[in-house]
Image (cartoon, grey):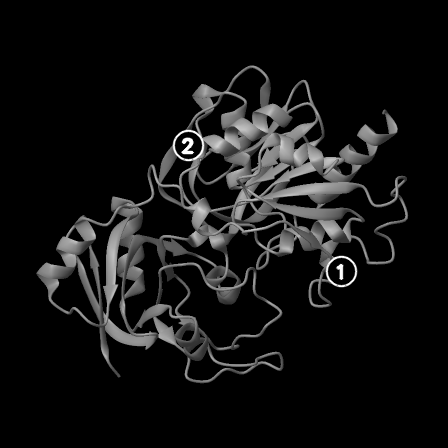
Amino acid sequence: MAVAKLALQDGNIFVGSSFGSPGEVDGEVVFNTSMTGYQEILTDPSYRGQIVTMTYPQMGNYGVNQEDIESQKPHLAGFIVRENSRIESNFRSQGSLHDYLSHNGIVGIAGIDTRRLVRHIRSQGAMNGVLSTRDLDDASLVSKAKTSPGLVGRDLVKEVLPATSRQWEEGLSEWAMLPELGDSSDQVRTDVQVPEPHIVALDFGMKWNIPRHLTHEGLRVTILPGTASAEEVRKQKPDGIFLSNGPGDPEPLDYAIQTIRALLGTRPIFGICLGHQLFGLACGAQTFKLKFGHRGANQPVLDLRSGKVEITSQNHGFAIDEASLPDCLEITHRNLNDNTVAGLQHREVPAFSVQFHPEASAGPHDSQYLFQHFREAVCSSLANG
């Protein structure tokens, strides 16, 4: 097995075994606490520019398949695991994690002390690193890590957004149709008073399970690139507007902020993750970079309106600065790990957002009701003219 090395910008070196594709990549080194869902993580465009460490010790044990992908291809820079399973055992498996990474050109490293790495990031904060199977000189790798551009101030959305618009037609798979989801498929459309309300989803790097959920709610979905102007959105004659997740720092995305600001109050708006941050920025709030971010399928969030605690799937390294919130926004959810803002609602127009992922994939279904709330807001807006 070939040697691979991970070098952090602060000089720490981790030596392990190469798996996946050989090569050299740089990016922000982060960690995800999910026990499963590695294929969804690999294909989540929000990980663009990052080298992802999995905290659970074994990955690859249930293989990969074509149903669990969240975009056309993996978008992360590199993948770090404690152990890459030599056996994939699941009736849905269509191949191995190693082969999947290799086919998609993703550099991986296994066999390092991921516990030590994660504890270091948790203490010192997420930092830039270089993962290589080619250059194995420690000093050279650390020097490269120090010059890696990082995430702050970069527009990574333009590297992952779709080139053209499209109509979304795929619903939830049979594997998502579990009792925990809430509604069964034959219940979903019975209370929709207006046939197929039309949603424009602004795609900043959207996970595919989001439009699957929107379609499941009886909504017709048109996906536009996140660079679309307010006029281009209006031309689609939407009944509601969705703001997707996506990678990196929200503040450089002036085009998106201006579009959202121009659309506020014209149609109901729902934002997730990066869409939540962009919604806040469009309303006058500010964002800041978290020390090591929230990434995993086990993040507790308090719904301030109901008093219920939801276990949520999250993946973000930036958050809304509560001290900067304008009067027009109220906080609806809080992350119970660090008390950061996890949900917002506009006081004057039908618009709301959450920092977490109610579509999960992978993750719990506690917050799936938010798609129902969005549908209800759209139908109410249509009923009121």
Q: Residue furthest top?
A: 327
Q: Quadrant of residue 108?
A: bottom left
Which residue is painted at 56% across and 50% down in the image? Answer: 206
317 w.r.t. 178: above or below: above
Give the quadrant of the C terminus.
Answer: top right
Give the quadrant of the N terminus.
Answer: bottom left
Q: Position of residue 148 (x, y in %)?
A: 23, 50
Q: Decide if residue 98 is in sight here.
A: yes
Query: Would residue 308 be found to the left or right of residue 16 on screen?
Result: right
Which residue is painted at 90% across and 40% down in the image? Answer: 193
68 w.r.t. 297: above or below: below
Amino acid at the residue labelled 2? Glu
Q: Position of residue 230 (x, y in %)?
A: 61, 30
For disc 1, the marked residue is 179
Which residue is painted at 48% across and 77% down in the image? Answer: 61
Which residue is painted at 29% across and 74% down in the image? Answer: 22
Q: CA distance from mark 1 to mark 2?
A: 39 Å
Q: Position of residue 94 (x, y in %)?
A: 56, 81
For disc 2, the marked residue is 251
Q: Nearer the viewer, mark 1 or mark 2?
A: 2
* Dot 1: element: helix
Amino acid at the residue labelled 1? Pro
18 w.r.t. 384: above or below: below
Q: Quadrant of residue 364?
A: bottom right
